Image (cartoon, grey):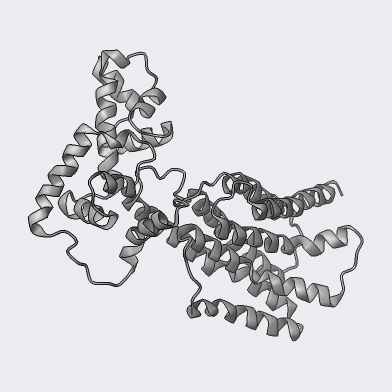
Amino acid sequence: MLIKNFENFVLVLLYGGLLIISFTILLNPMKVNKKANFFFSLFLFLWSSYWALDILRLCSFSPSPVLVSFIFFIQIFTPVFLFFSTVFFINPNYQFKKKDLVCLIVPLIHLILILNSELGIADFLAVSHNLPYIAIIYFRIKKYQKRIENISSYTETINLQWLVTLSSMLFGIIVITVCYDLFNMLVHRFNQNLVMVVLFLFIIYSTSFQVLRQKEIYPVNEKEREQLLAVELEDEEKTEKKKLIPDQEFEALKSKLLTVMLTEKPYLDGELNLLKLSDLININPHQLSYLLNNGFNENFFHFINKYRVQHAKELLTSDSYKKFSILGIAFESGFNSKTAFNTIFKKMINETPSEFRRKQSGI
């Protein structure tokens, strides 16, 4: 009895939390990633429907067959809204296409099963239907995380790592849920849901904070956004690679870029992106990306952070900066966080900033 009461308590926290978070994200207090947040709020709202009937019964309300069928039907769209939320996070200028109608095929099959009173199979389909979407989301974001390095020198707040974590956790727990449902259908009815409910509760509350603090990924200015998206997404387009800089200008632009990096030190700007640097050397972002890829064999992220790490090394060995903390050195070198500084520094130097400083000071 005690376990059942605790399960009901967690159930209320789960359902109520999903509704509150979904409406908070829908209101979008930070006014960022509007389309992505809209679809994510719908995803959370529909996700709550998986426990709506349990809450109604907990309130001693007997739902009608029509209401039950409707709730079962809308559940099938849960991963669809999560998928399109991810799409708009990655590309806020995305336009719906005819091929997106393929997302309606399984919902139609699901509706037919419900109308034929095959609720058990319909419920199993609604749960298992999540798996391919979550897998696609995971791989799309991982691909995006590599692409974003072509346009930004600081990716920690825009790499959507929380969505990768969410999709990984959802994939694991849904696999468990599918196995659980199959066991109930084919072997033995087992009604202990406490562990599953607690797991979902953890996922929801650990994710909600990340969603609400997600910054605008691309500039609000429409022209700037289109320019950066064009560069970032160009690898996905099956277009012929063109020579964007004439051979006679290529070496001169390389020298100009190196001079700008040496004299103006734009890498000390923590918000530096491809567009800002291209303006400094008076070429367009496509040309700068082409110059970095073909002239230095590097993407924008690696090119800029290489300078930041070199600057940090100089500060870490300078007597004038002995009293500076590692975080202070990070900020002075153009990094926006200690985590990013440690990660990038160790990747390039093969030791942390603290280890480098100790070794250089002979301690």
Residue at image position (35%, 26%) is 332
Residue 363 in sight: no
In the image, residue 96 sits, relative to residue 158, either above or below, namely below
The reply, left or right, for residue 226 in relation to residue 309 is right
Percent of width and height locating residue 42: 65, 62
Of 301 and 267, nearer the camera is: 267
Q: Residue furthest left?
A: 248
The reply, left or right, for residue 115 in relation to residue 329 is right
Percent of width and height locating residue 319: 27, 13
In the image, residue 249 sits, relative to residue 262, either above or below, namely below
Residue at image position (54%, 47%) is 214
Of 129 and 21, nearer the camera is: 21
Q: Residue furthest right?
A: 60
Residue 152 in sight: yes
Percent of width and height locating residue 55: 82, 59
Residue at image position (53%, 79%) is 102
Percent of width and height locating residue 238: 30, 72
The reply, left or right, for residue 98 in relation to residue 58 is left
What count of labels does the image hold? 0
Of 66 and 21, nearer the camera is: 21
Rendered-image quadrant of the C terminus: top left
